[in-house]
Image: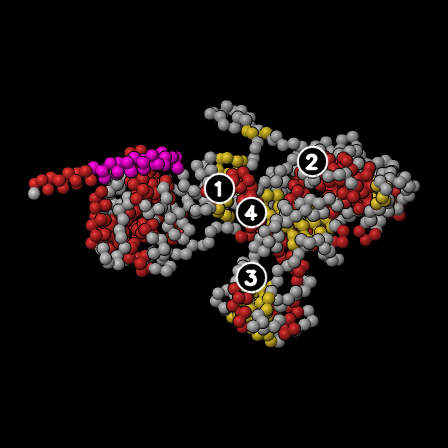
Amino acid sequence: MLRLIGYLFSLASVFVLICAIAVGFFIANAQRELPDYTTLADYSPPVKSRIYASNGEVIAEFATEPRIFLPIQSVPDRVKAAFISAEDKNFYHHSGLDFGGLARAVLVNLTNMGSDRRMVGASTITQQVAKNLLLTSDQTMTRKVKEALLSIRMEQAFPKDRILELYLNQIFFGQRSYGIAQAALTYFGKSVGDLSVAESAYLAALPKGPANYNPYQFADAAVERRNWVIDRMVENGYISDEIAQTEKHKPLGVSRQPAPTRFEEAGYFIDDVRKTMIGELGEQGLYEGGYSVRTSLDPGMQRQAQHALRSALLTYDEQRGYRGPLDHIDAPASRSAVLEKYRSAFGVPSWIAAEVTAVGPDGADLALIDGTESRAHIALSGMKWALGRKGPKELLKSGDIVLVEKEPSSDYRLRQLPQVQGALVAMRPDTGRVVAMVGGFSYGQSQFNRATQALRQPGSVFKPIVYAAALDNGFSPATVIRDEPVEFQLGSQVWSPKNDGGHYEGPVTLRFGIEHSRNVMAAKLASAVGMDTVMQYAERLGIYEHRPPVLSMSLGSGETTLMKMVSAYSVIANGGMQVTPSLIDRTQDRTGRTVYRQDQRKCVDCNVSTWSEQAEPQLIDTRERILDPMTAYQTITMMEGVIERGTASRRVQLGRPVAGKTGTTNDNRDAWFVGFTPELVTGIYIGYDDPRSLGREGSGSGLAAPVFNSFMNAALIETPISGFHMPEGMTEYRIGRHTGMTARQEDSDTTIEAFKPGTGPAMSFTTLGDPLGATLESSPQTQRALDAGSVGLF
């Protein structure tokens, strides 16, 4: 018997030794495959980037894992206590593995064997960090061994608070929330520092199973688990029993928070910022880098811009009649499929699809396709624009799917998505900061940004560039050109520009030509200056790049974007200084370090230790001067005449100094207006995406200028009135509009004109030579002015 016992003991010893050797080899092999845990010293979890408006309002967030990183120093003790009690009560006492907890878990699992109770684990917070950040979630022995080894080493390398910080910022809480800070906002709409004991306990209950304790589906289970965590906090000595009883009787307190922040009215602006950031940081950098991007967007102006443009597009579209329903339900069997197709938004939050259920002489009854199938009604007043000479029964039929919008009354208004599109850009001329940008009727309808991506002919909006080039090359606003039909020999072809309406004025000044948008005068002026020179100015102003100097481009036949035209006008409004459009003011990384700043000006000696009565430091503007400031001022004063007497008169009425230019292309395919005050430059474009005529009313003055007027009146309502500054050294004279000669104050048809040093009005009547060398005669208006024979200095 003794020999048998000895034999069995020897066998057991050999078996144990073999197992020990195998385990040793297994552990040694696992150690060789361990990831580098030291990277956790500098590890930063993916954090969402936030986009801010100029007033600090959050307008968009970008994230693969919505998370706000929170340093452990900012986490209250009661929140730490809740998580430690729920997940690892011995966290501050073990060295990575909780052997006592492991033994209890094994005992509980053996006791529950054969029952329906789920197995309990004994992973410490350190082990969870190791698994989540360094390993996979594979349920294998190898992964478990690696997890244990890493936990021991991490405890030796990092302080407990660093491990807890990683845990609280990494874990998933459900509802697309990662990390404690984001979870507090998602479930309770408050910061971590404001969480109560009960709220902290509920969040601590979620990591075990976010779906199991979803407060909107399993509220009872969520409360039960929360109270279990509160009891553990009492058991571990973190709170008293009295506090626990009070907290356990509180309601869950979870409330649905708004959808992820996005300023819907600024969809095009936000998308351009997103593309810029991806270009600079990469997609991963934007969605995981935790950047803070301060933009130039003014939320108030953006809303006003969208309203002004959208209203104009809707009015224009509705004047052309109703194009019919979105769809029609032909058979009951197809009803559910059709309704599902139109449940999604149509790019306008207040618009909704509806099914026509009945049509009568006083309107139509509807069933809203919003998930509730609520009943609604369109009165005759709500479809008046679409009726024409029809009755409601001729317009709509039961089963039609239509778009409607709730009116201030209880009734609805019939709507349709306009086919015509447009864009608006508003920019600060002194900095190039884009304060508002609308790229179409609705970003939800079409993400194509017509402000920056649509290449369209600017038409007469380009003419001020021709005039500025001429003013920089020896011409003045008082230069007289004969406005009459002309032919230009362009190689083997003859080009004969025509004025809109076929009317010609005879000899008139440059001012008259730009005020009344005379095509012949602009072409003659461009020919005299040289299209090579004109195109050089267009390139310096950023309108075109390397375009051939074709004479027809003097009338705006070359394609460009609205953003480029607004930038060019900003140079004029800014006294000739270079202006670079910018949507981003500043970008900071997650630590607050500025990685980009739009304002590149240097301030020498701005920071000094003491003040010794020295002069204030000067900000050095290193931007290039594109235009002579006197040329810019002369161009501005002529464009003021466009508003006062020219093509935009009665269309733009701001009650303050304003300059601008209308533009309409051939067959009224594109309608433009770009104008400015000293504080703000705004451009509007309206046209079809597939270019076709806008009709007789589709001109720059008829369509685009009213949008400018509506937006600018709203945008500048609180801005003090200021005028355009005339550079020193210029002299003002009163001149005749048709003669360009000096005139007396009592003379009719005169204006005040600013001249550069060494220049002034002509003392005798002269005109710019005609390209064909034709003999020039005075027009009746010019002859009357000459007969007056008046000369005078203003």
| Left/right of residue 108 with respect to residue 4 in the rendered view | right
Q: Earlier in the sequence, mark 1 or mark 4?
A: 4
Quadrant the N terminus occupies = top left
Residue picked out by circle 3:
351
Q: CA distance from mark 1 to mark 4?
A: 16 Å
Give the magenta-colored segment's residue range.
16-43
Q: Earlier in the sequence, mark 4 or mark 3?
A: 4
Residue picked out by circle 1:
284
Q: CA distance from mark 3 to mark 2?
A: 44 Å
Residue 774 location in percent, x, y? 91, 41
In this orientation, does residue 161 appear?
no
User: 283 and 269: which one is in front?
Assistant: 283
Q: Earlier in the sequence, mark 4 or mark 2?
A: 4
Q: Residues within 10 Å of mark 4 (few under 14, many from 20)?
A: some
Q: Residue at x 46, y 54 (%)?
A: 259
**Residue that extends furthest to the bottom in the rendered view of this protein:** 361
Rendered view: 194 above or below 391: above
Image marks 3 and 2: residues in contact by CB distance under 8 Å: no
Q: CA distance from mark 1 to mark 3?
A: 35 Å
Residue 19 sits inside the magenta stretch: yes
The kind of residue tagged 1 is Gln
Residue picked out by circle 2:
540
Query: Which structural element holds mark 2?
Result: helix
Q: CA distance from mark 2 to mark 1?
A: 36 Å
**Residue that extends furthest to the left in the rendered view of this protein:** 1
User: 187 and 135: which one is in front?
Assistant: 135
